[in-house]
Image (cartoon, helix red, strand yellow):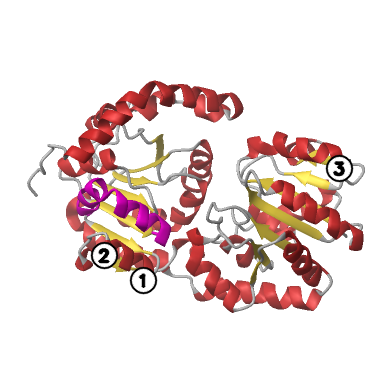
Amino acid sequence: MARQSTKPSMALALYRMLLWLATPFIFARLWWRGRREPGYRQRMAERFGAIDATGLDGVIWFHAVSAGEVIAAAPLVRRLAAHYPERGLLLTTMTPTGAEQAAALLGDVVTHRYAPYDMTFAVQRFLQRLRPSVLILLETELWPNLIHLTAARSIPIYLLNARLSARSAKGYGRIAALSKPMLAKLTHISCQYPDHAQRFQTLGVAAPRISVAGNLKFDRSLPADLTQRCDELAHACLIENRLIWLAASTHDGEESLLLDSFQRLREQQPSLQLILAPRHPHRVADVEALLKPLEYRSARLSEILKAPLQDSVDVILVDQMGMLLPLYDLADVAFVGGSLIEFGGQNPIEPALVGTPVISGPHCFNFTEVVEKLVAVGAMYQVSTVQELVSTLLELLNDPQLRARSGGAGRAETEANRGASEKVAQQLIQLIGDTAH
Protein backbone atom coordinates (compact mmCIF):
# COMPACT_ATOMS: atom_id res chain seq x y z
CA MET A 1 0.00 0.00 0.00
CA ALA A 2 1.40 3.38 -1.00
CA ARG A 3 1.89 5.98 1.69
CA GLN A 4 -1.00 8.39 1.74
CA SER A 5 -0.46 12.11 1.37
CA THR A 6 0.44 13.88 4.58
CA LYS A 7 -0.70 17.27 3.29
CA PRO A 8 -3.53 18.44 5.53
CA SER A 9 -6.76 19.94 4.22
CA MET A 10 -7.59 23.51 5.14
CA ALA A 11 -10.07 22.23 7.75
CA LEU A 12 -7.45 19.93 9.31
CA ALA A 13 -4.88 22.73 9.27
CA LEU A 14 -7.34 24.97 11.13
CA TYR A 15 -8.07 22.16 13.62
CA ARG A 16 -4.35 21.76 14.24
CA MET A 17 -3.86 25.48 14.73
CA LEU A 18 -6.69 25.65 17.26
CA LEU A 19 -5.24 22.68 19.16
CA TRP A 20 -1.82 24.30 19.17
CA LEU A 21 -3.28 27.48 20.63
CA ALA A 22 -5.11 25.39 23.24
CA THR A 23 -1.99 23.45 24.29
CA PRO A 24 -1.27 25.52 27.45
CA PHE A 25 -4.88 25.07 28.56
CA ILE A 26 -4.67 21.30 27.91
CA PHE A 27 -1.58 21.09 30.13
CA ALA A 28 -3.32 23.16 32.80
CA ARG A 29 -6.52 21.12 32.69
CA LEU A 30 -4.60 17.86 32.97
CA TRP A 31 -2.70 19.15 36.00
CA TRP A 32 -5.86 20.58 37.58
CA ARG A 33 -7.83 17.37 37.08
CA GLY A 34 -4.96 15.50 38.70
CA ARG A 35 -5.69 17.37 41.94
CA ARG A 36 -8.94 15.42 42.35
CA GLU A 37 -7.98 12.33 40.37
CA PRO A 38 -4.27 11.65 40.98
CA GLY A 39 -4.12 9.10 38.18
CA TYR A 40 -4.12 11.94 35.68
CA ARG A 41 -0.73 13.11 36.95
CA GLN A 42 0.86 9.72 36.47
CA ARG A 43 2.75 8.94 33.26
CA MET A 44 1.83 12.37 31.88
CA ALA A 45 4.56 12.23 29.25
CA GLU A 46 2.75 9.40 27.49
CA ARG A 47 -0.15 11.73 26.77
CA PHE A 48 2.23 13.81 24.69
CA GLY A 49 3.68 10.88 22.77
CA ALA A 50 6.74 10.18 24.93
CA ILE A 51 6.20 6.46 25.43
CA ASP A 52 8.54 3.60 26.16
CA ALA A 53 8.05 1.44 23.05
CA THR A 54 10.68 -1.18 23.91
CA GLY A 55 9.62 -4.47 22.35
CA LEU A 56 6.46 -2.97 20.87
CA ASP A 57 7.56 -2.39 17.27
CA GLY A 58 4.86 -3.64 14.89
CA VAL A 59 2.22 -4.34 17.54
CA ILE A 60 -1.50 -4.61 17.00
CA TRP A 61 -2.73 -1.42 18.65
CA PHE A 62 -6.15 -1.23 20.34
CA HIS A 63 -7.42 2.13 21.54
CA ALA A 64 -10.36 2.48 23.96
CA VAL A 65 -11.24 5.66 25.77
CA SER A 66 -12.11 4.37 29.25
CA ALA A 67 -13.17 1.49 31.50
CA GLY A 68 -16.45 0.64 29.78
CA GLU A 69 -14.84 0.28 26.37
CA VAL A 70 -11.99 -1.82 27.79
CA ILE A 71 -14.47 -4.17 29.46
CA ALA A 72 -16.45 -4.49 26.23
CA ALA A 73 -13.33 -5.13 24.16
CA ALA A 74 -11.74 -7.69 26.51
CA PRO A 75 -13.14 -10.88 24.88
CA LEU A 76 -12.17 -9.57 21.43
CA VAL A 77 -8.66 -8.62 22.53
CA ARG A 78 -8.11 -12.08 24.01
CA ARG A 79 -9.32 -13.70 20.77
CA LEU A 80 -6.81 -11.63 18.76
CA ALA A 81 -4.03 -12.41 21.23
CA ALA A 82 -4.69 -16.12 20.78
CA HIS A 83 -4.70 -15.84 16.99
CA TYR A 84 -1.54 -13.72 16.76
CA PRO A 85 0.59 -15.11 19.61
CA GLU A 86 3.82 -13.98 17.97
CA ARG A 87 2.78 -10.33 17.83
CA GLY A 88 2.56 -7.94 20.73
CA LEU A 89 -0.71 -6.23 21.61
CA LEU A 90 -0.85 -2.65 22.87
CA LEU A 91 -3.95 -1.22 24.55
CA THR A 92 -4.18 2.54 25.01
CA THR A 93 -6.77 4.43 27.00
CA MET A 94 -7.40 8.06 27.86
CA THR A 95 -8.41 7.59 31.50
CA PRO A 96 -6.80 6.05 34.60
CA THR A 97 -9.94 3.95 35.12
CA GLY A 98 -9.40 2.51 31.66
CA ALA A 99 -5.81 1.73 32.62
CA GLU A 100 -7.00 -0.05 35.77
CA GLN A 101 -9.40 -2.23 33.80
CA ALA A 102 -6.71 -2.98 31.22
CA ALA A 103 -4.45 -4.28 34.00
CA ALA A 104 -7.22 -6.23 35.73
CA LEU A 105 -8.77 -7.88 32.67
CA LEU A 106 -5.95 -8.04 30.12
CA GLY A 107 -2.69 -7.53 31.98
CA ASP A 108 -1.39 -10.93 30.89
CA VAL A 109 -1.89 -10.34 27.15
CA VAL A 110 -1.48 -6.60 26.50
CA THR A 111 0.87 -3.74 27.27
CA HIS A 112 -0.87 -0.55 28.39
CA ARG A 113 0.07 3.00 27.53
CA TYR A 114 -1.90 6.24 27.61
CA ALA A 115 -2.89 7.43 24.16
CA PRO A 116 -1.47 10.74 22.95
CA TYR A 117 -3.64 13.79 22.92
CA ASP A 118 -4.67 14.66 19.38
CA MET A 119 -1.96 17.27 18.92
CA THR A 120 0.22 16.84 15.85
CA PHE A 121 3.57 16.68 17.65
CA ALA A 122 2.23 14.20 20.25
CA VAL A 123 0.72 11.81 17.70
CA GLN A 124 3.79 12.00 15.46
CA ARG A 125 6.13 11.25 18.36
CA PHE A 126 3.91 8.35 19.47
CA LEU A 127 3.82 6.80 15.98
CA GLN A 128 7.55 7.28 15.41
CA ARG A 129 8.31 5.36 18.59
CA LEU A 130 5.63 2.69 18.29
CA ARG A 131 5.37 1.95 14.54
CA PRO A 132 2.24 -0.25 14.90
CA SER A 133 1.10 -2.66 12.21
CA VAL A 134 -2.64 -2.07 12.77
CA LEU A 135 -4.74 0.45 14.69
CA ILE A 136 -8.10 -0.70 16.09
CA LEU A 137 -10.35 2.03 17.48
CA LEU A 138 -13.31 1.28 19.76
CA GLU A 139 -16.77 2.87 19.55
CA THR A 140 -16.42 6.63 19.02
CA GLU A 141 -12.70 7.33 19.25
CA LEU A 142 -12.49 9.42 16.09
CA TRP A 143 -9.63 11.92 16.31
CA PRO A 144 -8.63 13.77 13.10
CA ASN A 145 -4.88 13.97 13.72
CA LEU A 146 -4.59 10.42 15.01
CA ILE A 147 -6.42 9.03 11.99
CA HIS A 148 -4.74 11.27 9.39
CA LEU A 149 -1.19 10.67 10.62
CA THR A 150 -1.71 6.94 11.12
CA ALA A 151 -3.16 6.52 7.62
CA ALA A 152 -0.27 8.56 6.20
CA ARG A 153 2.03 5.77 7.38
CA SER A 154 -0.08 3.21 5.46
CA ILE A 155 -1.28 1.63 8.71
CA PRO A 156 -4.77 0.06 8.39
CA ILE A 157 -7.33 1.58 10.76
CA TYR A 158 -10.43 -0.29 11.90
CA LEU A 159 -13.29 1.21 13.91
CA LEU A 160 -15.06 -1.53 15.90
CA ASN A 161 -18.27 -1.58 17.92
CA ALA A 162 -18.93 1.74 16.27
CA ARG A 163 -21.94 3.74 17.35
CA LEU A 164 -23.18 6.98 15.90
CA SER A 165 -26.29 8.58 17.34
CA ALA A 166 -28.51 10.82 15.24
CA ARG A 167 -27.28 13.80 17.26
CA SER A 168 -23.61 12.93 16.71
CA ALA A 169 -24.19 12.32 13.00
CA LYS A 170 -25.73 15.76 12.70
CA GLY A 171 -22.71 17.24 14.45
CA TYR A 172 -20.27 15.51 12.10
CA GLY A 173 -22.35 16.72 9.18
CA ARG A 174 -21.86 20.32 10.28
CA ILE A 175 -18.08 19.89 10.11
CA ALA A 176 -18.03 17.75 6.96
CA ALA A 177 -14.87 19.47 5.73
CA LEU A 178 -13.05 17.87 8.66
CA SER A 179 -15.06 14.71 9.30
CA LYS A 180 -15.52 13.41 5.74
CA PRO A 181 -11.77 13.15 4.90
CA MET A 182 -11.18 11.61 8.34
CA LEU A 183 -13.83 8.93 7.85
CA ALA A 184 -12.51 8.23 4.36
CA LYS A 185 -9.19 7.10 5.87
CA LEU A 186 -10.79 4.32 7.93
CA THR A 187 -10.15 0.90 6.39
CA HIS A 188 -13.35 -0.61 7.78
CA ILE A 189 -16.13 0.29 10.22
CA SER A 190 -17.94 -2.47 12.13
CA CYS A 191 -21.12 -0.99 13.58
CA GLN A 192 -23.30 -2.09 16.45
CA TYR A 193 -26.61 -1.69 14.62
CA PRO A 194 -27.97 -0.97 11.10
CA ASP A 195 -29.06 2.58 12.00
CA HIS A 196 -25.46 3.43 12.91
CA ALA A 197 -24.22 2.00 9.61
CA GLN A 198 -26.75 4.08 7.70
CA ARG A 199 -25.60 7.25 9.44
CA PHE A 200 -21.98 6.57 8.50
CA GLN A 201 -23.09 6.11 4.88
CA THR A 202 -24.97 9.41 5.05
CA LEU A 203 -21.68 11.03 6.11
CA GLY A 204 -20.02 9.67 2.97
CA VAL A 205 -18.53 6.30 3.97
CA ALA A 206 -18.92 3.78 1.15
CA ALA A 207 -21.20 0.83 2.00
CA PRO A 208 -18.54 -1.87 1.25
CA ARG A 209 -16.39 -0.43 4.05
CA ILE A 210 -19.18 -0.81 6.63
CA SER A 211 -20.59 -3.89 8.36
CA VAL A 212 -22.94 -4.61 11.28
CA ALA A 213 -21.93 -7.11 13.97
CA GLY A 214 -23.92 -6.29 17.12
CA ASN A 215 -22.84 -4.80 20.43
CA LEU A 216 -19.69 -6.13 22.11
CA LYS A 217 -21.01 -5.05 25.51
CA PHE A 218 -23.50 -7.92 25.55
CA ASP A 219 -20.57 -10.35 25.63
CA ARG A 220 -19.31 -9.43 29.06
CA SER A 221 -18.81 -12.53 31.18
CA LEU A 222 -19.62 -12.64 34.88
CA PRO A 223 -16.60 -13.14 37.16
CA ALA A 224 -16.40 -16.46 38.97
CA ASP A 225 -16.23 -14.72 42.37
CA LEU A 226 -19.28 -12.49 41.81
CA THR A 227 -21.43 -14.24 44.43
CA GLN A 228 -18.63 -14.09 46.98
CA ARG A 229 -18.08 -10.37 46.32
CA CYS A 230 -21.81 -9.71 46.72
CA ASP A 231 -21.93 -11.56 50.02
CA GLU A 232 -18.90 -9.67 51.34
CA LEU A 233 -20.36 -6.31 50.31
CA ALA A 234 -23.75 -7.08 51.81
CA HIS A 235 -22.14 -8.09 55.10
CA ALA A 236 -19.80 -5.09 55.27
CA CYS A 237 -22.59 -2.64 54.42
CA LEU A 238 -25.19 -4.27 56.74
CA ILE A 239 -27.73 -4.61 53.91
CA GLU A 240 -28.44 -8.38 53.87
CA ASN A 241 -32.12 -7.98 54.72
CA ARG A 242 -32.97 -4.62 53.19
CA LEU A 243 -34.52 -3.54 49.90
CA ILE A 244 -31.78 -1.86 47.88
CA TRP A 245 -32.05 0.86 45.26
CA LEU A 246 -28.82 1.46 43.34
CA ALA A 247 -28.52 4.76 41.47
CA ALA A 248 -25.48 4.22 39.25
CA SER A 249 -23.34 6.33 36.92
CA THR A 250 -25.11 9.52 37.95
CA HIS A 251 -24.13 12.97 36.71
CA ASP A 252 -24.20 16.50 38.05
CA GLY A 253 -27.80 17.67 38.08
CA GLU A 254 -29.23 14.21 38.69
CA GLU A 255 -28.27 13.50 42.29
CA SER A 256 -30.54 16.21 43.71
CA LEU A 257 -33.49 14.69 41.80
CA LEU A 258 -32.59 11.21 43.00
CA LEU A 259 -32.33 12.34 46.63
CA ASP A 260 -35.72 14.03 46.29
CA SER A 261 -37.08 10.70 45.04
CA PHE A 262 -35.44 8.88 47.92
CA GLN A 263 -37.12 11.16 50.44
CA ARG A 264 -40.53 10.36 48.95
CA LEU A 265 -39.79 6.64 48.77
CA ARG A 266 -38.74 6.53 52.41
CA GLU A 267 -42.25 7.63 53.40
CA GLN A 268 -43.55 4.26 52.17
CA GLN A 269 -40.37 2.18 52.44
CA PRO A 270 -38.70 3.43 55.66
CA SER A 271 -35.89 0.87 55.54
CA LEU A 272 -35.02 1.35 51.86
CA GLN A 273 -31.25 1.43 51.31
CA LEU A 274 -29.92 3.85 48.71
CA ILE A 275 -26.54 3.17 47.13
CA LEU A 276 -25.43 6.11 45.02
CA ALA A 277 -22.54 5.78 42.57
CA PRO A 278 -21.57 8.95 40.67
CA ARG A 279 -20.15 8.35 37.20
CA HIS A 280 -16.95 10.08 38.36
CA PRO A 281 -16.05 8.93 41.89
CA HIS A 282 -14.36 12.21 42.82
CA ARG A 283 -17.83 13.82 42.74
CA VAL A 284 -18.81 11.96 45.91
CA ALA A 285 -17.87 15.11 47.84
CA ASP A 286 -20.47 17.05 45.84
CA VAL A 287 -23.13 14.48 46.74
CA GLU A 288 -22.16 14.64 50.41
CA ALA A 289 -22.82 18.38 50.26
CA LEU A 290 -26.33 17.66 48.94
CA LEU A 291 -26.92 15.18 51.77
CA LYS A 292 -25.99 17.56 54.60
CA PRO A 293 -29.28 19.48 54.85
CA LEU A 294 -31.24 16.20 54.54
CA GLU A 295 -29.66 14.79 57.70
CA TYR A 296 -29.25 11.33 56.24
CA ARG A 297 -26.48 9.14 57.58
CA SER A 298 -24.04 8.28 54.82
CA ALA A 299 -20.76 6.44 54.40
CA ARG A 300 -18.23 6.06 51.60
CA LEU A 301 -17.80 2.54 50.29
CA SER A 302 -14.01 2.77 50.39
CA GLU A 303 -14.18 3.40 54.13
CA ILE A 304 -16.71 0.60 54.65
CA LEU A 305 -14.39 -1.86 52.93
CA LYS A 306 -11.61 -0.87 55.33
CA ALA A 307 -13.86 -1.08 58.40
CA PRO A 308 -17.30 -2.73 57.98
CA LEU A 309 -20.27 -0.80 59.35
CA GLN A 310 -21.38 -1.39 62.91
CA ASP A 311 -24.61 0.57 62.43
CA SER A 312 -26.57 0.87 59.22
CA VAL A 313 -26.62 4.09 57.19
CA ASP A 314 -29.23 5.63 54.90
CA VAL A 315 -27.01 6.26 51.88
CA ILE A 316 -23.87 4.44 50.75
CA LEU A 317 -21.69 6.49 48.40
CA VAL A 318 -19.55 4.60 45.91
CA ASP A 319 -16.22 6.41 45.59
CA GLN A 320 -14.16 3.88 43.65
CA MET A 321 -14.29 2.18 40.28
CA GLY A 322 -14.86 -1.50 39.54
CA MET A 323 -17.70 -1.97 42.02
CA LEU A 324 -20.81 -1.63 39.88
CA LEU A 325 -21.29 -5.22 38.74
CA PRO A 326 -21.59 -6.75 42.25
CA LEU A 327 -23.66 -3.76 43.36
CA TYR A 328 -26.03 -4.25 40.42
CA ASP A 329 -26.32 -7.89 41.46
CA LEU A 330 -27.09 -6.89 45.05
CA ALA A 331 -29.68 -4.28 44.11
CA ASP A 332 -33.39 -4.97 43.89
CA VAL A 333 -33.82 -2.13 41.38
CA ALA A 334 -31.21 -0.07 39.52
CA PHE A 335 -31.38 3.40 38.06
CA VAL A 336 -28.83 4.09 35.30
CA GLY A 337 -27.75 7.73 35.14
CA GLY A 338 -26.80 10.25 32.51
CA SER A 339 -30.43 9.99 31.45
CA LEU A 340 -32.39 12.51 33.53
CA ILE A 341 -30.19 15.17 31.95
CA GLU A 342 -29.38 15.44 28.24
CA PHE A 343 -26.13 13.50 28.45
CA GLY A 344 -27.37 10.50 26.50
CA GLY A 345 -27.40 7.78 29.15
CA GLN A 346 -24.95 5.22 30.46
CA ASN A 347 -24.79 1.49 29.73
CA PRO A 348 -27.95 -0.38 30.90
CA ILE A 349 -26.65 -3.81 29.87
CA GLU A 350 -24.79 -4.56 33.13
CA PRO A 351 -27.85 -4.55 35.44
CA ALA A 352 -29.83 -6.55 32.88
CA LEU A 353 -26.97 -9.04 32.67
CA VAL A 354 -27.32 -9.89 36.37
CA GLY A 355 -31.13 -9.89 36.30
CA THR A 356 -31.85 -6.57 37.99
CA PRO A 357 -34.76 -4.40 36.76
CA VAL A 358 -33.53 -1.16 35.17
CA ILE A 359 -34.95 2.37 35.26
CA SER A 360 -33.63 5.36 33.36
CA GLY A 361 -34.61 8.87 32.44
CA PRO A 362 -35.76 9.83 28.92
CA HIS A 363 -32.36 10.83 27.51
CA CYS A 364 -30.72 7.59 26.34
CA PHE A 365 -29.63 8.47 22.81
CA ASN A 366 -26.18 6.94 23.34
CA PHE A 367 -27.84 3.53 23.82
CA THR A 368 -31.03 3.88 21.77
CA GLU A 369 -31.12 0.34 20.36
CA VAL A 370 -30.18 -1.34 23.65
CA VAL A 371 -32.82 0.61 25.55
CA GLU A 372 -35.47 -0.23 22.94
CA LYS A 373 -34.67 -3.94 23.29
CA LEU A 374 -34.79 -3.92 27.08
CA VAL A 375 -37.95 -1.79 27.27
CA ALA A 376 -39.70 -4.03 24.72
CA VAL A 377 -39.24 -7.15 26.84
CA GLY A 378 -40.17 -5.43 30.13
CA ALA A 379 -36.66 -5.37 31.57
CA MET A 380 -36.30 -1.59 31.58
CA TYR A 381 -38.55 1.37 32.41
CA GLN A 382 -38.11 4.97 31.25
CA VAL A 383 -39.42 7.90 33.28
CA SER A 384 -39.46 11.63 32.67
CA THR A 385 -40.19 13.15 36.08
CA VAL A 386 -39.40 12.58 39.73
CA GLN A 387 -43.00 11.55 40.32
CA GLU A 388 -42.78 8.92 37.56
CA LEU A 389 -39.49 7.69 39.01
CA VAL A 390 -40.99 7.32 42.48
CA SER A 391 -44.12 5.57 41.17
CA THR A 392 -42.12 3.11 39.07
CA LEU A 393 -39.72 2.36 41.90
CA LEU A 394 -42.57 1.75 44.35
CA GLU A 395 -44.29 -0.56 41.88
CA LEU A 396 -41.13 -2.65 41.55
CA LEU A 397 -40.10 -2.53 45.20
CA ASN A 398 -43.56 -3.60 46.35
CA ASP A 399 -43.88 -6.51 43.92
CA PRO A 400 -41.20 -9.24 44.15
CA GLN A 401 -42.81 -11.21 41.31
CA LEU A 402 -42.69 -8.19 38.99
CA ARG A 403 -39.02 -7.70 39.86
CA ALA A 404 -38.33 -11.36 39.11
CA ARG A 405 -40.10 -11.20 35.74
CA SER A 406 -38.39 -7.96 34.79
CA GLY A 407 -34.96 -9.15 35.85
CA GLY A 408 -35.42 -12.49 34.12
CA ALA A 409 -36.44 -10.75 30.91
CA GLY A 410 -33.30 -8.62 31.04
CA ARG A 411 -31.06 -11.63 31.60
CA ALA A 412 -32.69 -13.49 28.70
CA GLU A 413 -32.36 -10.50 26.38
CA THR A 414 -28.67 -10.04 27.11
CA GLU A 415 -28.10 -13.75 26.47
CA ALA A 416 -29.98 -13.54 23.16
CA ASN A 417 -27.73 -10.71 21.96
CA ARG A 418 -24.39 -12.32 22.75
CA GLY A 419 -21.92 -13.30 20.05
CA ALA A 420 -20.65 -10.00 18.62
CA SER A 421 -17.11 -10.54 19.93
CA GLU A 422 -16.55 -13.75 18.00
CA LYS A 423 -18.20 -12.32 14.88
CA VAL A 424 -16.01 -9.21 14.99
CA ALA A 425 -12.89 -11.25 15.76
CA GLN A 426 -13.38 -13.49 12.74
CA GLN A 427 -14.04 -10.49 10.53
CA LEU A 428 -11.03 -8.62 11.87
CA ILE A 429 -8.68 -11.58 11.40
CA GLN A 430 -9.87 -11.85 7.81
CA LEU A 431 -9.33 -8.13 7.23
CA ILE A 432 -5.92 -8.00 8.89
CA GLY A 433 -4.67 -11.20 7.30
CA ASP A 434 -0.87 -11.23 7.15
CA THR A 435 -0.62 -7.51 7.96
CA ALA A 436 0.03 -8.37 11.58
CA HIS A 437 2.70 -10.99 10.82
Say which mark, if any, is on residue 194. 1
Disc 3 marks a residue whose amino acid type is Leu
Q: Name the residue nearer the viewer: 7 or 100.
A: 7
Disc 2 marks a residue whose amino acid type is Gln
Which secondary structure lies at badge 1? helix
The Cα–Cα distance between marks 2 and 1, rounded to whole angstroms, is: 11 Å
Q: Does the magenta run of residues contain 177?
A: yes
**Magenta region, residue range:** 164-186
10 Å crowding of disc 1: few (<14), some (14-19), many (20+) = some
Disc 1 marks a residue whose amino acid type is Pro
| First in sequence: mark 1 vs mark 3 | 1
Position above or below: 69 against 12: below
Position above or below: 355 against 342: below
x and y, in percent, of residue 217 in the image: 49, 61
| First in sequence: mark 2 vs mark 1 | 1
x and y, in percent, of residue 84 in the image: 29, 53
Q: Residue at x 32, y 66 (%)?
A: 197
Q: Residue at x 73, y 51 (%)?
A: 257
Which secondary structure lies at badge 2? helix
Residue marked by disc 3: 294
